[in-house]
Amino acid sequence: MSVQRDEEWLEAATAEEITRALDAGELNELLGRSVPAPLPPEGQADAAWLASASLEAVSRAYDTGQLDQLLGRPAADATANE
């Protein structure tokens, strides 16, 4: 998850710094946009993480098997041994 900048930072930043921060999603909170939750550090995601995650983060978690438990599937590493 990217660092979220505050109003104090914004007032002191140059136009170039603001542009970089905007492109990196670091102004999302100030602009009233959702701030994506990072992927769970390891293992399976839980319902609380899922409720706050962005569509992109959910998609990545799905692709990496981190939603298997919530979806009622066997964990990906368990099926690899079969």
Image (spheres, rainbow, N blue to C red):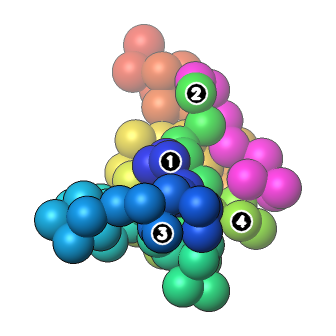
- Going 62% across and 86% down the picture, which residue do you hit? 32
Which of marks 4 and 1 precedes in the sequence? 1
Q: Can you tell which mark lies on residue 57?
A: none
Toward the top, the furthest residue is 81
The stretch in magenta equals 42-49
Which of marks 4 and 2 precedes in the sequence? 2
State how many labels appear.
4
- The answer to whether residue 74 shows anywhere in this view is no
Q: Could you tell me how far apart the alpha carbons at marks 1 and 4 are, in whole angstroms?
A: 16 Å
Name the residue tied to disc 1: 3
Name the residue tied to disc 4: 52
Nearer to me, 69 or 18 = 18
What type is the residue that disc 1 sits on?
Answer: Val
Name the residue tied to disc 2: 41
Which of marks 3 and 2 precedes in the sequence? 3
Q: Could you tell me how far apart the alpha carbons at marks 2 and 4 are, in whole angstroms?
A: 15 Å
